[in-house]
Amino acid sequence: MATHAQRVHVGHTIEWLQAHAARLDYPPRDNRDDRDSWSWHLTEGQAEHVVAGGGRLQLDCSELGSWVLKCAGLWHWSTPGYTGSHLELLTSHYTDPRTADVGALVIFGPGTGDHECIVYRPDHDHGDPVLAGHGRPGFDVAHLSEIRARHRPPVRFLSIAHL
């Protein structure tokens, strides 16, 4: 069960990534390589050490979401998976953004999905949570409404409540 402390940790990890966005690369031509695997297998402390020493991390959108959850002790698989596998692994899906809490994965697009983000700041009243995502070099933090405008429907939320 995802605890309040773990969700707070997710938020802090997202803040750290945002503060170090200039050190975050996206896989060239959207093809994962050894740098992705190396980065994803780093612990949070190791990643902080790499970045503090001037190094860089490389993750794609779904690797980033699973790495953030791994840092908070919520990802129990030995690999990052990909957007489509996240739809299979996290079986509690919903579409109402007002029910999304910190750490929920957000999948954009039909089928196995086109893009993935993670909820950073919920919006239980209006349904426009702030999401964190990584679909290019750097790091994006924006409202659901802004990100949704750049992607195909549907938008599906994956609950982390039972991880």
Image (tube, rainbow, N blue to C red):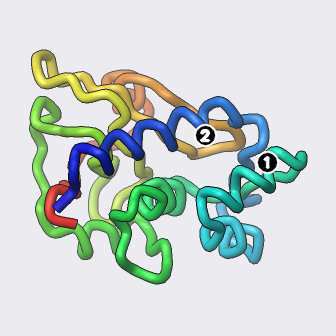
CA separation in Å, label 1 and label 2: 10 Å
Q: Nearer the viewer, residue 32 or 68?
A: 68
Q: Is residue 74 above or below residue 130?
A: below
Q: Of callouts 1 and 2, which one flags the residue occurring earlier in the amino acid sequence?
A: 2
Quadrant where the C terminus is found in the figure:
bottom left
Q: Position of residue 25 (x, y in %)?
A: 74, 50
> Which image quadrant for residue 10?
top left
Q: Is residue 66 left or right of residue 128?
A: right
Q: Position of residue 96 (x, y in %)?
A: 10, 37
Q: Nearer the viewer, residue 72 or 96?
A: 72
Which residue: 62% across, 73% down? 41
Which residue: 60% across, 32% down? 18
User: Farthest residue in the bottom direction?
Assistant: 78
Pointer 1 residue: 51
Q: Amino acid at mark 1?
A: Val
User: Farthest residue in the top direction?
Assistant: 126
Q: Is residue 80 left or right of residue 41?
A: left
Q: Amino acid at mark 2?
A: Leu
Label drawn at residue 17: 2
